[in-house]
Image (spheres, helix red, strand yellow):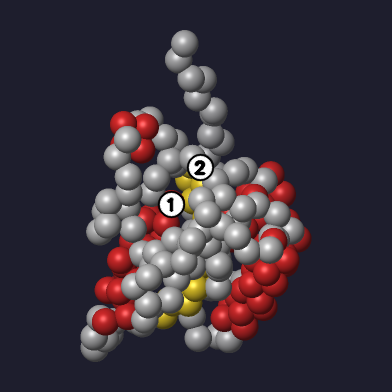
Amino acid sequence: MTEKKKKIKMPKKFSDEPKGLVICYIGAGKGKTTAAMGMAVRAAGDGKNVFILQFVKAGNKTDDKVKEGEWPISSEINFFDNISYSGNIGTIENEQVGLGFVGILGDKKEKDIHIRAALKGVERAREIITSGKYELVILDEIISALEVGILEERDILDLIKLKGPLQHLVITGHNQYPKILKQCDLVTEMKMIQHPYYKGILAQKGIDY
């Protein structure tokens, strides 16, 4: 059975005035963080300053030994940390505020520890968004933090309200929350068609992370 296409209502007029957007990459398919990181590079290429704040994902940049239940630092972060900025190129800063998977894949941390880390991440996001230093702020996996119960929906909605008129905000995660999606200007769902995991192939460094 073919999927029914939703009819899109076109606006009567268009404006080329700059506007800060709220952008959401969501869904069960791979590519949400990848799309956000690509946008970070594009924005920096246009001279915009970018800050990437990663929730849930964890890792110590100076320690190759990843603890149980944690994700390794994704390889694009190594690139962002070592790139030389010059000319009209914007900067890309990043920070990890998560402590890894919550209650799965070997995670033995008390949930309260994850909650405290996530709430500290929300406070850090407030500082970054309101600092006036960044034209693009990426809150990677913040919706995932909501999904595993270490953040509440209002935490994300409050951060969206803080966004400046010309500032762009990107959020990522798996599940759809109507109240959050209603506040977004652009929502792209990553739909899984095939995945190597279901062929017994684990994530490939430099491709998946």
Estimate how packed mark 2 is, as few (under 14), some (14 to 19) or many (20 or more) residues with alpha carbons within 10 Å.
Answer: some
The residue depicted at 56 percent of the width and 50 percent of the height is 104
| Secondary structure state at the residue bearing disc 2 | loop
Drawn side of residue 198 relative to residue 13, left or right = left
Labels 1 & 2 near each other (Cβ < 8 A): yes
Query: Does residue 168 appear in the picture of this structure?
Result: no
Query: Does residue 111 appear in the picture of this structure?
Result: yes
Which residue carries the number 2 mark? 27
Which residue carries the number 1 mark? 32
Quarter of the image for residue 158 reads bottom right
Please say if 99 is above or below 62.
above
The amino acid pointed to by label 2 is Gly
Q: CA distance from mark 1 to mark 2?
A: 8 Å
Q: Position of residue 127 (x, y in %)?
A: 62, 83
Q: Position of residue 82 (x, y in %)?
A: 26, 82
Estimate how packed mark 1 is, as few (under 14), some (14 to 19) or many (20 or more) residues with alpha carbons within 10 Å.
Answer: many
Q: Position of residue 73 (x, y in %)?
A: 38, 68
The residue depicted at 51 percent of the width and 51 percent of the height is 105
Which quadrant of the figure contains the C terminus?
bottom left
Along the line of sight, which residue is nearer the eye, 142 or 70? 70
